[in-house]
Amino acid sequence: MPGLVPIFDSLDYYPDPQVQVPRYQNLYTQFERTYHVTPDFVSRSPGRVNLIGEHIDYCQFSVLPLAIDVDVIMAVRAQDERVIELANLDPTFGARTIPLPDGDLISIDASESDWSNYFKCGLLVAHELLMEKTGGKVLLKGMKILTTGSVPAGSGLSSSAAFVCASALATLHANGMKHITKADMTKITIVSEHHMGVNTGGMDQAASVCGERNHALYVEFRPELKATAFKFPELDPPLAFLIANTLVTSNKHETAPTNYNLRVVEVSVAAQLLAKKLSVTIANDGNLNCGTLRGVMDSYYASHGQAAWLGAIQEGEVRLSQMLELTEKHIRKEAYTTQELAAELGLTEAEFHDRFLSLFPVSFEKLHIYARAKHVYSEALRVLKALLLLQLSTDSGTFYTEFGRLMDQSQASCDTLFNCSCDEINRICDIARKNGATGSRLTGAGWGGCTVHLVPVNRVTEVERALIDEYYKVKFPGITVADLQEAIVVSKPAYGSSLYIQR
Ligand code: NG1
């Protein structure tokens, strides 16, 4: 993750400066209308699409996302008055005024899903970093901010990560931090949304901060957080990633107790149960401080006298296959009640509750341990296979078939083992595959949101046409051309977070 967050003075780094110039001009004009001063700079962070590796970042297994062209941009003017004036070009997000506390960190009421809370998340983690760097209290400057974004909200393209990263970057730059490293930005932003009560992994922020043009990012969480860019092979015909939004919105904050947060609980319990069955001790790390399935794998191999896995693909494949066998052998297929799990782990029910169910609210009847663990280990294995395909110069046909197959297998696992797909996602994937996509899957948390498809560039129009006729026009008969243009995006891997200062 080498390097500094870049500072640009032109918009030429976008693939479509002819679209961006009027967009930025409009932001500047509206800023001046709103605040009667000009902005000092624009902070920007993109959305991302995950190619493969779903719901495994919070199990500390590597993932393969890429940053995309859609982004959040935030025009900023620092001020001595210690207040944040926050406005959005989209009128659904009303203006907010946030007074800054004297030297203390800002407090966030996670029970409210107000948009300004996401700004506060970025501000808070940036404030912590500024204090860490200066070794003392830091009185934050006030800011006037006007923002706009092209990442569709609640669609699995990480609009929240893009917004939080742009907010953190704005705060660091406005408060005089000269050299902002991508490593620092990633480190602080990956935990930022935990302040909103969502127990997020770290993939989105790493991709949003570290994106590279024409590259996928291999994001590792162990032994340390690292994002390595891998160039896509030159294929004939060239490849495109088509992103199709189901237009079924899954609000992560509101559905967290039965969806995202519940999965975090299930994989944490799975880690403890498997560790117990294998008689290994795991560190109390991970999102719930109860260990991770990666931790189980590492401890299991350590207990057999083997060195820690540092990421070599072949060795990873062997170890993950073994973990799949051990899951099969030791974890029963049927879901568990909390009573059963407490007994298995030698805990009272109250202890089980304190340990796994008290940090974030969850709601369930039974916990699915086997299916979640199988998804996690098999998905981590697929990521390694996908990475290998990126590294080998295989012929175009093989790349399309093999990479596509991994994407399809990932989708099947998300659907049947992790239960994070939905009818609309499955339908879109079927249509895309029948019309030229060689691989199709959900991207992001799922339960709605976006899908991603690997498509040879000469088949893109066919896939688009079929999706419009067989999905969008059927499910949303009144859909407009403008809505369709937003729903289907063909994106190239884009640059990560950046600052823009007008000459
Ligand atoms: P989305 O739904 O795209 O924000 C979420 C998590 C990721 C990852 C994926 C599932 C947040 C901010 N992001 O992505 O870290 O766990 O789900 O792979 O919660």
Image: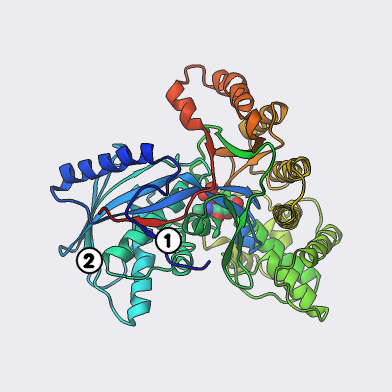
Identify the secondary structure beneath mark 2: loop
Q: Which amino acid does label 1 sit on?
A: His
The one nearer the camera, 296 or 322, is 322
* x then y, percent, for residue 193: 45, 58
What is the residue that sits farthest to the left in this orientation? 36
Please determine whether, in this image, residue 376 is positioned above or below residue 415.
Answer: below
| Residue located 65% across and 65% down the image | 349
| Dot placed on the residue nearer the N-terminal end, 1 or 2 | 2
The image's mark for residue 141 is 2
| Residue located 73% across and 58% down the image | 384
Q: Seen in the image, is 155 located left or right of residue 122? A: right
Q: Seen in the image, is 200 located left or right of residue 103? A: right
For discs 1 and 2, the disc positioned in front in the rendered view:
2
* x then y, percent, for residue 61: 66, 62
Q: In which quarter of the image is the C terminus?
A: bottom left
Residue 439 appears in the figure: yes
| Residue located 32% across and 69% down the image | 105
The one nearer the camera, 316 or 365, is 316
Q: Seen in the image, is 415 located left or right of residue 123? A: right
The one nearer the camera, 27 or 322, is 27
Q: Which amino acid does label 2 sit on?
A: Lys
* CB atoms of marks 1 and 2 within 8 Å: no
Identify the secondary structure beneath mark 1: helix
CA distance separating discs 1 and 2: 21 Å
The residue that disc 1 covers is 195
The one nearer the camera, 348 or 207, is 207
Crowd around label 2: few <14 · some 14–19 · many ≥20 (10 Å): some
Residue 345 appears in the figure: no
* x then y, percent, for residue 144: 22, 54
